[in-house]
Amino acid sequence: MNLDRYRSVEDALWASLDIQPTEREVPLHALGTTVRVLEIGRGPTVVFIHGGSASGANWAPLVAALDGFRCILVDRPGCGLSKPIDRDLSDLDRFEEFANLLVADIIDGLGETSAHVVATSLGGHFALRGAATHPERVRRMVEFGFVPGAPLTKVPFSMRLAMIPGLGRLMVSIPPTRGAVRAILRQLGMGAALKDGRISDEMFDWFHALLRDTRTMRNESTLPRGLIGTAGDGSSSLPDELLARIACPVRFAWGETDPIGGADVARSFVPRIPGAELELWADTGHAPWMEDPARAASTVADFLNR
């Protein structure tokens, strides 16, 4: 672990976008911890919740193209420069209790009564659970890509390996090379974006530093196996009765070729949320905002400003 090196690479990413975020710690009183956040811009508050093995800086390309909002980029507990939470989350029931509280706890820590939420992947799981458990706290929500808890038709090979007891911990104990990071991004459907330069050198360096120099990936490896579910068995960690309690307007921007779950999964999952909208992006993988930040910013602004 080398947090100073990580900080310098993250700073270089923001400098490349001509942005200087404000960094601070936000208390989470219900969960008994704090999280590090980066704050950018002015306007209505938007809380950004990143996906698995990432951090708040993951949203840098999107917020660089987004005007008119106070963007709060959260390093979830155990990710980036936030300390891990002092409890075992390997049990699905305990994890879901944690997930139910996180978003409202962040909004409380910011001193707000409610906020918009933008999330992706595992962050979307937190966002949807938070909106269902505390419907008065979330105004509007934009979700990018597949969410753990959506029905799977297949489990990607890398996820199957990570689910093998002991092997997942071994995989994250080895500092990834730049080649390994490229392989991870390709597995997430971003091979074309890497090849044609839509993922900048600074963005790639940031992701490599995050996985190499922080404990993010190791901390995330303790998440419960039942969170994803088993392909074809009908199981879900986001049951219909929970999704039915979501009262805020929700829009999904979902890559048609998301390798974890593409257009078919999106079409079967999104209608389970009352009134939710689905925007399918052709030839796009698991991280639409990284492949087309300008379109992502337009999607967020148009929906949150309604």
Image (cartoon, helix red, strand yellow):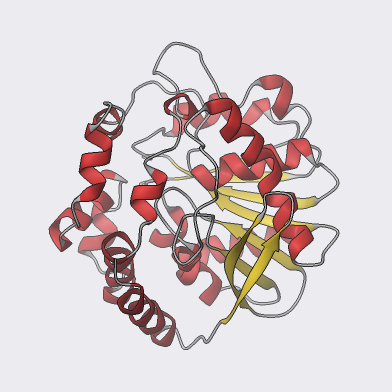
Q: Is residue 47 above or below residue 96?
A: below
**Residue at 28% in and 34% down:** 162
Between residue 296 and residue 5, name the one nearer to us.
Answer: 5
Between residue 52 and residue 77, name the one nearer to us.
Answer: 77
**Residue at 49% in and 54% down:** 84
The C terminus sits in image quarter: bottom right
Q: Given the current orientation, which residue lies at the most extreme top position?
A: 233
Q: Is residue 60 above or below residue 220?
A: below
- Position in image of residue 225 (x %, y %): 42, 27
Judge from the rendering whether residue 63 lies leftward or rightward of residue 103; answer left or right: left
Residue 108 image-quadrant placement? bottom right
Q: Is residue 132 visible?
A: yes
Judge from the rendering whether residue 187 lies leftward or rightward of residue 120; answer left or right: left
- Position in image of residue 204 (x %, y %): 28, 68
Residue 69 image-quadrant placement? bottom right
The N terminus sits in image quarter: bottom left
Between residue 155 and residue 293, name the one nearer to us.
Answer: 155
**Residue at 36% in and 84% down:** 12
Judge from the rendering whether residue 43 lies leftward or rightward of residue 281; answer left or right: right
Count the marks.
0
Q: Is residue 59 above or below residue 278?
A: below
Q: Is residue 47 above or below residue 5?
A: above
Q: Given the current orientation, which residue lies at the most extreme front position?
A: 86
**Residue at 22% in and 57% down:** 181
- Position in image of residue 83 (x %, y %): 50, 60
- Position in image of residue 106 (x %, y %): 70, 58
Q: Is residue 277 visible?
A: no
